[in-house]
Amino acid sequence: MRAFSGIQPTGIIHIGNYFGAIKQWIDLQQKFECFFCIVNQHAITIPQNPKALKKNTIDLATLYLACGLNPEISTIFIQSEIKQHTELTWILNTITKISELERMTQFKEKAKQHRKNVNVGLFDYPVLMAADILLYKTDVVPVGEDQKQHVEITRTLARRFNKIYGQTFKIPEVLIKKESARIMGLDNPFKKMSKSAKSPLNYIALDDSPELIFEKIQKAVTDSGKEIVYNPQKKPAIANLLTIFSLITGKSIKEIEKEFQGKGYSEFKQKLAYEIIEFLSPIQAKKRDLQKNEKYVFQVLEIGKEKAKIIAKETMNRVNEKIGLI
Ligand code: TYM
């Protein structure tokens, strides 16, 4: 059984990305043959500084390793190094309906955010994602909830291709962990925590310093009242902070509610900040170590590229054969 997933190297990687995606990946490595990609071609659908993009790409690979992805058992690679991703995108484009892409929530949101640059790549983003997944004969795609729609269109395209050209692609399943499916913004509990948020107070980045984490948690919005109870309808901000607390410590929400019974927001927030700092500190230390050994990171990516290439080529040959492309 194979798993495939990826993250865009757009600079900030936050705890939503960690718990929605990376944490799941770490656990899956034991059970699945895993492919973890750094999807730099997706990133350029929004303008990127070339130097920063290169740096962020290597930085994200380093972070994958620092978080505990194991290159001995998983394949870690950069999207742009495997040309078949864009090759398959073209093929899938020919069976994708414009109306299907117009319905994509992420496209509609991004188009609103970048009104002056609603480029064709941004529109076609889900098809590139479908190509990523289908190239590797993927069984499961571990992601946060915001990517569910993209996996659904991947399934539609795979079925459609199989119907037109004969059995070729596996139909992948989306894998979403209920507890961490959607971490909300610290400054707005009605919107997901997001890399592209206007204010850094929206997220805790995995790279944030202890001082910054402390400040962000202190400034996180809370709800009226003063009790620490989990009630997403009436107390969405506290519910989100409780979710984060639970994910970070491994304690159940019930246990945490009990721990803070009769205590106020201030004490709860202080403890939460402390727990996040403790949690991120070994990841940050490991990342600093790896940064001193960039050669190793490049080596991992080189091996990943070679492993990914074999499967990608094989799938693409099969696809071209089915279509009649010489
Ligand atoms: P990206 O880079 O926006 O996010 C990476 C992963 O983090 C998850 N995520 C969240 N999970 C919980 N709460 C949040 N607030 C939160 N914000 C982000 C995302 O769901 C994702 O799993 N299109 C993808 C990248 C991609 C991909 C793929 C993923 C490209 N090709 C193939 C899987 C398979 C994206 O933009 O993720």
Image: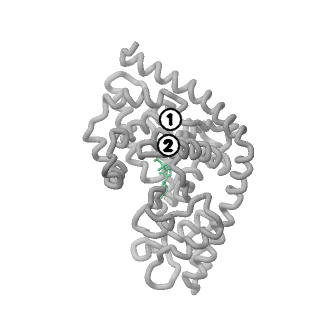
Looking at the image, can residue 299 be seen?
Answer: yes
Residue 5 seen from this side: no
Q: Would residue 46 be found to the left or right of residue 291 on screen?
A: left
Q: What is the x, y in percent for residue 259?
A: 62, 79
Q: Which residue is mark 1?
A: 138
Residue 161, quarter of the rendered image: top left
The residue lying at 42 percent from left, 46 percent from top is 46
Q: Nearer the viewer, residue 206 or 162?
A: 206
Would you place residue 167 above or below residue 124 in this image?
A: above
Compared across the picture, whether 311 is left or right of 163 comes to right
User: Within 8 Å: ligand 1 and the Cβ of disc 2?
Assistant: yes
Quickly name the residue at label 2: 141
Whether the residue under disc 1 has CB within 8 Å of ligand 1: yes
Residue type, numbered disc 1: Thr
In this rendering, the answer to whether 114 lies above or below 311 is below
User: Whole-percent x and y of residue 233?
Assistant: 39, 72
| Residue 263 rendering spot, x and y as whole percentages | 58, 85
Residue 324: x %, y % from top left: 36, 15
Q: Residue at x 41, y 16 (%)?
A: 321
